[in-house]
Image (cartoon, rainbow, N blue to C red):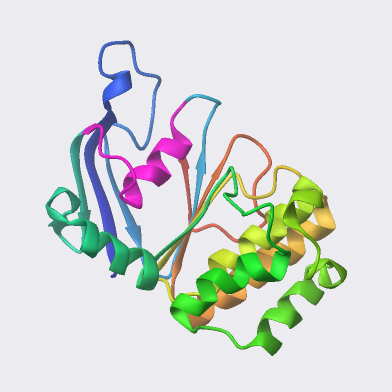
Amino acid sequence: MKTIVLQQVLPDVFAQGPIRPSEVWRSEVKFEKGKHYLVEAQSGAGKSTLCSYLTGYRNDYAGSILFDGMDIRTLKENDWSSLRRRHLSLLFQELRLFPELTAMENVEIKNRLTHWKSPKEMAEWFDRLGIADKMEAKVGRMSYGQQQRVALLRSLVQPFDFFLADEPISHLDEANSETMAALLAEESERQGAAIVVTSIGKHLPLPYDHVLRL
């Protein structure tokens, strides 16, 4: 997949009231493979909603969203399953980890589906992010910042053309944020993929090609 285009998209919940100025809603926006995008927003402006639209979890909007020119409203659930496994990866703001499983088990769940990374590569990622000693720890007993790093690793063990990161470093310090950004940038460059990051202030330190105000 090479392009995602939004054409006059507006969440239904915003349709009845005044709309804040936006470079995304009620506009035409193109996200291109290989580029980095930062979508800045105030709380409540719809950044998580945008990610949900682009990954097919919600469709309560007016306008059109096109993947390589195809309206995503025509996609079936099987199509979305394939897209999420091979072309789209989402780092959820709320993480959606399994607290009763270990950090490594949370990552392995996806890797068993994709067969994308070796155990050695995954262990090296844990080490780079400073959580090698937490690989066998239950996620529910880890800090939120540690969980954010586990969620990043889980979202990276798959092929993707577009990587969506919804407020990914809210609980990380500068050093961990930079390490996380470097790891994501390396894997995205390896795949020639785009990165789309949403932020309400603190954003992933990457060289962005475009900054959009939501």
Q: Is residue 206 visible?
A: no
Q: Quadrant of the C terminus?
A: top left
Task: Check the image and report above or below for 131 versus 21.
Answer: below
Quadrant of the drawing holding the N terminus: bottom left
Which residue is more in the foreground, 179 or 151? 151
Residue 145 visible? The answer is yes
* Location of residue 111 with respect to 164 vertically, above or below: below
Residue in the image at 28% along x and 57% along y: 4
Residue at the spot 60% in from the left edge and 61% down from the top edge: 207
Magenta span includes 14 = no
Q: Quadrant of residue 150?
A: bottom right
Residue 18 to residue 35: above or below: above
Closer to us: 32 or 47: 47
Q: Is residue 59 magenta?
A: yes
Give the percent coordinates (x, y) of residue 47. 46, 37
Return the residue found at the far top.
17
Question: Quick one: 116 or 78, which is closer to the camera?
Answer: 78
From the top left corner, tell me how far across and down residue 135 is, in percent: 78, 70
Identity of the residue drawn at 60% across and 34% down: 200
The magenta stretch spans which residues? 45-61
Q: Is residue 116 left or right of residue 94?
A: left
Q: Is residue 22 above or below residue 85?
A: above
Q: Quick check: 77 left or right of 107?
A: left
Q: Position of residue 64 (x, y in %)?
A: 18, 43
Residue 89's spot in the image, x, y percent?
45, 62
Q: Residue furthest front?
A: 100
Figure label count = 0
Which residue shows up at 75% across the image and 66% down it? Answer: 179
Q: Quadrant of residue 35?
A: bottom left
